[in-house]
Every structure is written in C-alpha cells, then in structure tokens.
Image (tube, helix red, strand yellow):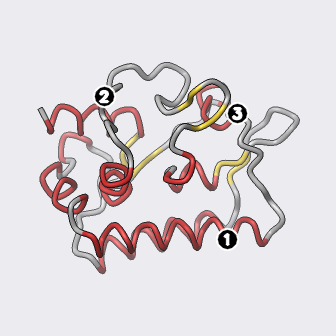
C-alpha cells in the first residue's frame, strides 16, 4: 500500500481502463456499496455539498481501479487536471456531473443538512472490498489524494 503518487502505476491504470471485466468488477462493487448505503436509509440528495469537500476539511482519496473506472466511463476525465480548488473538478453547478460513476469516497462521504460531513461507517467495509479487488485483479493498490491522482494521471497520459 502506498500514498506516493509518484509511484502511481499509470500504464496499469490505462490497461485496466480498457479491460471490460475489470471495469465491470469495479462497477459492481460501487453498485453494491450504493445499495448497502441506501439499505441503511441514507439517501444522497445530490445537492453538491460533498463536492465541496474542502469546506469540510475532508481529504478525498482514490485508487488505481477507480481511476481506471473513470477513464472507461467518463469522457475527458483529465481535461480539467490542475484546476482543483476547494471543489471537485466534476462539480457542475450544485451537483456532480459524473454522479453514476462517482468514486467510492464520494459514495461514503455523505453530507448532513446541518452542513457537517459524515463518513458512512460501513464505508470501511467497502474500502476493504476495494483493496481486495485490487489484489484479486493483480492491480497494485495505492491510496492517493484525489486532486493529486487526477493530475498525475493527466501527466502520464500526455
């Protein structure tokens, strides 16, 4: 496990993004996490508060499999690299422009109407499942801060 984005396996991420069974496996995990969260009666209101993670003092992290999934599902993923401020680059107006394909950290970081963010406690279970999926698919696991990961991916693609 590493958090050093300089070691981010760009070629492996690009390969995984073009490999249908890998993308399907990541999509399935994200879908199961979504259903688990909903089962607990916690529903996303798509208000865009979680996209402003800087306001909460919260840091968002991503893994190689999630980056591969985004590359496969979202056009021009890296086109806004380097433009992160306090908001996610995929926030459009008050909502997420990639909502169906958002990261696990976005799914488990839920806003509260009182303005304080909360990480969904079973999120640890889904993070462990994501680590295990990396192991199963023989994709190196890294946990890299979201803005840094997208910037590194953009540099690696150029």
Tags 2 and 1 touching, CB below 8 Å:
no
Task: Estimate how packed mark 2 is, as few (under 14), some (14 to 19) or many (20 or more) residues with alpha carbons within 10 Å.
Answer: few
Location of residue 141 (image quadrant): bottom left
Residue 106: image x %, image y %? 58, 48
Residue displayed at 71% across by 42% down: 46
Name the front one of labels 3 and 2.
2
Q: Earlier in the sequence, mark 2 or mark 1?
A: 1
Q: Tell me the crowding category of disc 3: few under 14, some 14 to 19, or many 20 or more residues within 10 angstroms, Cα based.
A: many
Q: Quadrant of residue 34?
A: bottom right
Q: Nearer the viewer, residue 33 or 47?
A: 47
Percent x, y for residue 64?
30, 55
Q: Residue at x 45, y 67 (%)?
A: 27
Residue at (74, 36) in percent of width and height: 47
Q: Which numbered disc flags the more N-terminal residue, 3 or 1?
A: 1
Residue 49: assigned label? 3
The residue carrying pointer 1 sits among few (fewer than 14), some (14 to 19) or many (20 or more) residues within 10 Å by Cα, namely some
At a point 56% along the width and 30% down the height, the residue shown is 91
At mark 2, the secondary structure is loop
Give the distance between the C-alpha atoms of the residues marked 2 and 1, in whole angstroms: 31 Å
Q: CA distance from mark 3 to mark 1?
A: 21 Å
Q: Are marks 3 and 2 in contact (CB under 8 Å)?
A: no
Give the SS element for disc 3.
Answer: loop
- What residue occupies the far front of the structure in this picture? 75
Quick one: quadrant of the C terminus? top left
Q: Is residue 99 above or below residue 140?
A: above
Q: Sequence order check: which comes first, mark 3 or mark 2? A: 3
Task: Write down the residue under mark 1.
Answer: 35
State the image coordinates of residue 118 (x, y, percent, origin top left): 73, 47
Q: CA distance from mark 3 to mark 2?
A: 23 Å
Mark identifier at residue 79? 2
């Amino acid at each position: 496990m590493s958090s050093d984005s300089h070691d981010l396996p760009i070629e492996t991420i690009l390969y995984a993004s073009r490999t249908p069974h890998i993308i399907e496996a990541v999509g399935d995990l994200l879908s199961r996490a979504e259903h688990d969260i909903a089962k607990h009666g916690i529903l996303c209101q798509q208000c865009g508060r979680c996209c402003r993670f800087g306001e909460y003092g919260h840091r968002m992290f991503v893994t190689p499999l999630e980056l591969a999934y985004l590359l496969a599902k979202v056009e021009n993923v890296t086109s806004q690299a380097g433009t992160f401020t306090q908001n996610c680059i995929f926030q459009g107006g008050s909502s997420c422009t990639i909502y169906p394909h958002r990261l696990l950290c976005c799914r488990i970081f839920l806003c509260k109407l009182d303005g304080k963010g909360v990480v969904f406690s079973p999120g640890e279970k889904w993070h462990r499942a994501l680590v295990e999926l990396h192991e199963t698919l023989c994709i190196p696991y890294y946990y890299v801060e979201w803005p840094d990961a997208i910037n590194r991916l953009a540099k690696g693609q150029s």
